[in-house]
Image: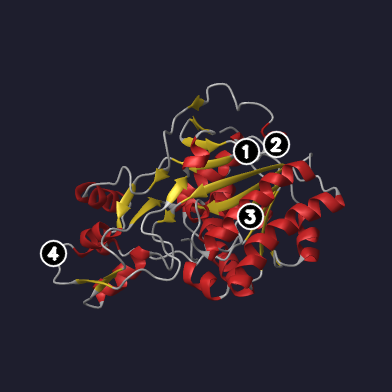
Amino acid sequence: MGKILEGKRILITGGTGSLGQVLTRRILSGEAGHPAKVIIFSRDEAKQHFMRVEYENRVAATDEIIYRNFQRLLEFRIGDVRDFGSVASVLRDADIVVNAAAMKQVPTCEYFPHEAVRTNIGGAENIVRAIQQHTLPVETVVGVSTDKACKPVNVMGITKALQERVFIQGNMRCPGTRFVCTRYGNVLASRGSVIPLFHEQIRSGGPVTITTPDMTRFLLALDDAVDITLAAIGEARRGETLVPQARSARIADVATALIGDRPVRQVTTGIRPGEKIHEVMVSEEEAYRTVKRGRWYVIRPMLPEVANGDGVTGDAAGCLDGAYSSKDSVMSMEETTAMLRARRLMLEDNVEAREELLR
């Protein structure tokens, strides 16, 4: 990876969420270089306060370097990606931007679609417009997206798909800035996700609720999400979207593994508004311009003005024959159980959910 963050000023919008918190910790560790500044930009003053206090209270020797870096480097700013003025102001102090601010919860977006449009699309447009209008020297913008943006059927996915397009086209509006995206699936043990829900239902004696026995999802850990974000900063070319090579699991198998031999039953409740049975991370239409680069699939931009060539040396073209779907390469029951144990996500591991919805 190299020291890609050395001396850089890094802005994380929505930085108090699950991804933002783990990304901040990894940045402060210095693994990718020592930044000049890390700015957490969000509208939730309570989460900013708790995040600040969490760092102030770190005393373990293993956390010393992160604690010292926090005192010197970490800055919190209240603002909203929906507000052009506050976005333009904070971008003046950034070299690298990770846009993690979003409405992410599927049913909420269905009931409040315009709010999702304002945050997920309007926020991205504000970033691009501020850089363009004020000729800001931002080097890289990473748009954090989701598998629900691929062949979307719900408001969250539709708005995130348009966010991807706003950022990719932003390469034409702001030639001095590199806009790239990441796209990934469900983050294990994030608050509001299925594993903490199942844990609570099992502790309460059940039942454990399954929307449909056939439902599958791509699963990855928060550190995997951070890995692909750092890879996008360090490796992605203008307009590219990085996608992890991730395994998928049946949600019913996840529930069965967590229940184990406990006398807890499962009930089927039906699909919630906007949900898919299977998720897709690369569509059939995108497969022909998708290459394999190291640990990632890379979707090359469709706009010829942005694509500007055929990728980089070593790209493995033709790596996908069709859609990259969670219904393919599904883990067995045994593999699902082993994965949960390896990630310390079983009920006996007493996992605490992260602070934010990342679904």
Q: Which residue is mark 3?
A: 163
Using the image, determine if residue 117 lies above or below residue 340. below
Q: Residue furthest front?
A: 285
Residue carrying label 1: 301
Marks 2 & 3, CB-CB < 8 Å contact: no
Q: Is residue 198 visible?
A: yes
Distance from Cα at disc 4 to Cα at disc 3: 44 Å
- Within 10 Å of disc 2 (Cα), the crowding (few <14, some 14-19, many 20+) is some
- Amino acid type, label 2: Val
Foreground pick, 252 / 231: 252
Where in the figure is residue 168, as x and y percent of width and height?
67, 45
Q: Residues within 10 Å of mark 3 (few under 14, many from 20)?
A: many
- Label 4 SS: loop
Q: Earlier in the sequence, mark 1 or mark 3?
A: 3
Q: Which callout, 4 or 1, points at the residue further toward the start of the chain?
A: 4
Tell us which disc is closer to us: 4 or 1.
1
Earlier along the polypeptide chain: callout 4 or callout 3? 3
Q: Quadrant of the N terminus?
A: top right
Secondary structure category for the residue under label 2: helix
For marks 2 and 3 on the same chain, the one whose residue lies earlier in the sequence = 3
Q: Residue furthest top?
A: 313
**Callouts 1 and 2 close, C-beta under 8 Å:** yes
